[in-house]
Image (spheres, rainbow, N blue to C red):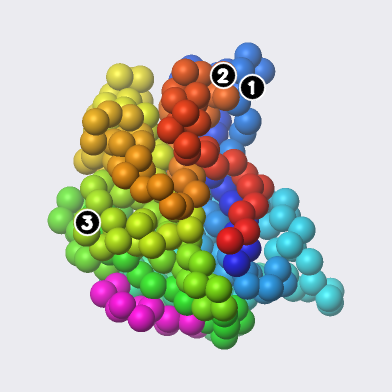
Amino acid sequence: MQIVVLGSAAGGGFPQWNCHCRMCQSVRNGTSRAQPRTQSSIAVSDDGENWVIINASPDIRQQINASPQLAKASGARGSGVRAVIVTDAQIDHTTGLLILREGLPLDLYCTKEVADELSTSYPILSMMKHWEGGYRTTTVDPASPEGWQIPSVPSLRFVPIVLDSNAPPFSPYRDRPRPGDNIGLQIVDTRTGASLFYAPGLASPAPAVLRAMDNADCVMMDGTLWTDDEMIREGLGTSLGSEMGHLSVSGDDGMLALLANFSKPRKVLIHINNTNPILDPDSPEYHAVLAAGVEVAFDGMEIHI
């Protein structure tokens, strides 16, 4: 299985266009070695030719153009993108569906709850029907232990894992999410048995999440905030990370402490907010992550398992 990190930042990217926090200013001014990052998205393939995008960020055009594996085509139009999966209905994971309209029709996989949100509260799917009929949407059962396969990447199996997170701010289910509002993905290469567990938004780990982490050869986990109150302390918000659906990286009950319980998988943090000091490779927080045997994802990162 081949994995490309198309975007490694949380919503807004890094630097965020209207943010003047210490981290965003440092990358604009060149006073740190932090590198810009686009909004969270990955792509997976079983042959290096046909790719499935997981979460279509607002930066998807830039991300595909920066990824030769995905951008190549044999004709005047086309790409290596064969299908899209969205794990929730958040704006930073679905706005790219608008950008991909020139490539429609495309296969789209999501839960019924997410498809409903994208047809009502944020009606992307309804709008896109005006471009070659829109997305060919397949709804998946978030509780399915078998998952599903996609014809263009026949050796990969996608198994949904319900995540404890939150529904989007525009959703009528905000602060009372349903099981299908947020899923992670256990992606299994059926040829080798190797697997990736991808969970870019996670407030707390349920037993199914712990099992997926234990079985995985690589985990890509929520790295949004270093501390739960980070946005409040920076004067950039009024909500804790946990209220937004994110487990902080640091702390006795944080992501690093959780990852320390697992010795097998390669461990990668993704979906990193612009305020998070782990973006600075010279910061003590970044070095604490490395000391814990964990990596910080960056745009263009390639993983083979």
Check disc 3 and report the residue beneath it: 206
- Other-residue count near label 3 (Cα within 10 Å), few / some / many at <14 / 14–19 / ≥20: few
Residue located at (49% from left, 45% from top): 268
Q: Earlier in the sequence, mark 1 or mark 3?
A: 1
Quarter in which the N terminus is drawn: bottom right
Quarter in which the C terminus is drawn: bottom right
Q: Marks 2 and 1: in contact by CB < 8 Å?
A: yes
Check disc 2 and report the residue beneath it: 282
Q: Circle 2 sits in a helix, a strand or a loop, which is it?
A: loop
Label drawn at residue 33: 1
Q: Circle 3 sits in a helix, a strand or a loop, which is it?
A: loop
At which x and y percent is residue 23? 51, 22
Question: Could you tell me how far apart the alpha carbons at marks 1 and 2 are, in whole angstroms?
Answer: 7 Å
* Residue 153 sits above or below residue 214 on the image: below
Q: Earlier in the sequence, mark 2 or mark 3?
A: 3
Outermost residue on the front side: it is 263
The region drawn magenta spans 134-149
User: Which one is in front, 54 or 219?
Assistant: 219
Residue 122 seen by the camera: no
Q: Which one is closest to the eye, mark 1 or mark 3?
A: 3
At which x and y percent is residue 203? 26, 46
Q: Which one is closest to the eye, mark 1 or mark 2?
A: 2
Amino acid at the residue labelled 3: Ala
Residue located at (43% from left, 81% from top): 148
User: Which one is in front, 1 or 263?
Assistant: 263
- Other-residue count near label 1 (Cα within 10 Å), few / some / many at <14 / 14–19 / ≥20: few
Question: Could you tell me how far apart the alpha carbons at marks 2 and 3 are, in whole angstroms?
Answer: 34 Å
- Other-residue count near label 2 (Cα within 10 Å), few / some / many at <14 / 14–19 / ≥20: few
